[in-house]
Image (cartoon, rainbow, N blue to C red):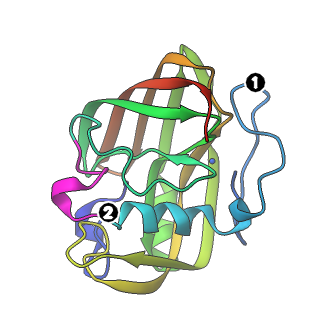
Amino acid sequence: MSPRSVLPLLVLLGLLVGCGAVGRKSSTDDVVSSEPSASALESIQGRWWTWASSETESTNPVADDTGEFCDRNQPEDVWFLAGTFGGTVRRTCALPAGRPLVFPLVNLVGDQADCEDFMATAKGSAVLDGRPVTPERMEEDDVAVTGVADNPLTGVEGTETFYACGLWARLRPLRPGRHTLTIHGSSGGFRVGADYTLIVATGQQA
């Protein structure tokens, strides 16, 4: 998540793809290394930002302190998670079996100069059930983001195009049961964190 001060146009906090994206896959079993689905070959950054911009602040998963709204507007092929607008929260999130997880450690939309400055000091870590996850560094131009009116990320209704960047993680579908995921990210003086308890349903999704 990027700091709110970055936006007049925006406000802000992997399956990856997208032109210009650069990433390194981890050898850990928890990081996705298989081929993404056809629908995931769209910009994962654009899809995440559209997801995160699809709710007003009262029900927005980025502004959520508990995980109550983590299931809002989730796509059928992946499950997105969010950081915060600054600071650390604890969330509990129930999700269906069979969904890969995609989330940013820290990220931004703006123009290329914004991203160059942001990524120069971007750092982050993710730990799943005690095991570190290797993040991917992504930068991509012409990312289409569609938001609803008064959303706390772009602030406007409709579709706009940005340069997007950040540190991202993508995880294979988790086994049914309870898991812990800790996400921390920073850029400059901005800090973000989310401590998740993830409860994966038994059985495959419908």
Which marked residue is nearer to the observer: mark 1 or mark 2? 1
| Magenta region includes residue 57 | yes
Along the polypeptide, which appears first: circle 1 or circle 2? Answer: 2
Residue topped by disc 2: 12
Give the answer, above or below, for where 151 lies relative to 92.
Answer: below
Alpha carbon distance from label 1 to label 2: 31 Å
Please tell me how many numbered marks the rendered image carries: 2
| Residue occupying the far left of the picture | 58
**Residue 83: x %, y % from top left:** 36, 45
| Residue occupying the far right of the picture | 35
Which residue is at a point 56% across and 63% down the rendered structure image?
Answer: 45
Mark 1 residue type: Asp
Label 1: few (<14), some or many (≥20) within 10 Å? few
In the displayed structure image, the side of residue 188 where residue 155 appears, left or right: left
Mark 2 residue type: Leu
Which residue is at a point 60% across and 23% down the rendered structure image?
Answer: 132
Which residue is at a point 58% across and 19% down the rendered structure image?
Answer: 176
Give the answer, above or below, for where 192 lies relative to 12.
Answer: above
Give the answer, above or below, for where 151 lies relative to 185.
Answer: below
Q: Nearer the viewer, residue 45 or 206?
A: 206
**Residue 127: x %, y % from top left:** 52, 24
Residue topped by disc 1: 29
**Residue 5: x %, y % from top left:** 23, 68
> Which quadrant is the C terminus positioned in?
top right
Which residue is at a point 75% across and 45% down the rendered structure image?
Answer: 24
In the displayed structure image, the side of residue 122 where residue 158 appears, left or right: left
**Residue 130: x %, y % from top left:** 54, 13
Q: Secondary structure under badge 1? A: loop
Q: Secondary structure under badge 2? A: loop
Give the residues in magenta.
55-64
Q: Nearer the viewer, residue 7 or 112?
A: 7
> Which quadrant is the N terminus positioned in?
bottom left
